[in-house]
């Protein structure tokens, strides 16, 4: 939430590699329902994985879903539901990504709000 009580319409779902494969590989329908709901509500849904893409592509040592199959599913969902999947090498990188994403949103929101106020003031003259 920003200082003016504006709720930032971004949701991050953080996942370790095993959680990612069990959630998006095994419980596909439940996760897909969350993604659809966020998309309909104009919420930017981000899935952030604590592994680089090259490791995810290798897949888990268990389970039915391949790494490549799950990555392709996530990229399809990116196109269909505007769900971004972010791959990070560790928790520190994940935390930095999340903080910087919210910072950028807040900065842009504040600048747009100032610009809108200036435009309204110009119209009133």
Image (tube, grey):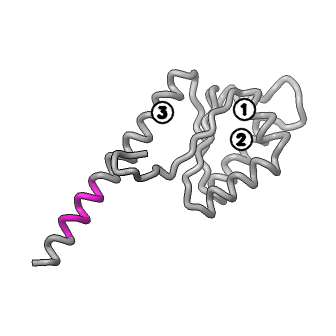
Residue neighbourhood size for the residue with mark 3, other residues' Cα within 10 Å, grouped as few (<14), some (14–19), many (≥20): some
- Check disc 3 and report the residue beneath it: 97
- Check disc 2 and report the residue beneath it: 71
Counting from the top left corner in percent of width and height, residue 116 is at: 25, 65
* Magenta span of residues: 111-119
Secondary structure state at the residue bearing disc 3? helix
Secondary structure state at the residue bearing disc 2? helix
Q: Earlier in the sequence, mark 1 or mark 3?
A: 1
Q: Give the overall secondary structure of the magenta segment.
A: helix
Spatial distance from mark 3 to mark 2, Cα to Cα? 20 Å
Q: Is residue 87 left or right of residue 68?
A: left
Q: Quadrant of the C terminus?
A: bottom left
Counting from the top left corner in percent of width and height, residue 87 is at: 60, 33
Secondary structure state at the residue bearing disc 1? helix
- Check disc 1 and report the residue beneath it: 57
Work out whether 87 lies above or below 72: above
């Amino acid at each position: 939430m920003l200082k003016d009580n504006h709720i930032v319409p971004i949701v991050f779902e953080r996942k370790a590699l095993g959680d990612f494969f069990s959630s998006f590989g095994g419980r596909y329908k439940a996760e897909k329902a969350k993604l659809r709901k966020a998309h309909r509500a104009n919420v930017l849904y981000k899935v952030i994985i604590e592994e680089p893409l090259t490791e995810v592509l290798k897949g888990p040592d268990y389970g039915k879903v391949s790494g490549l199959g799950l990555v392709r599913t996530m990229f399809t969902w990116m196109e269909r539901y505007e769900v971004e999947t972010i791959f990070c090498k560790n928790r520190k990188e994940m935390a930095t990504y999340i903080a910087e994403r919210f910072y950028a949103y807040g900065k842009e929101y504040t600048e747009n709000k100032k610009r809108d106020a200036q435009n309204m003031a110009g119209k009133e003259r």
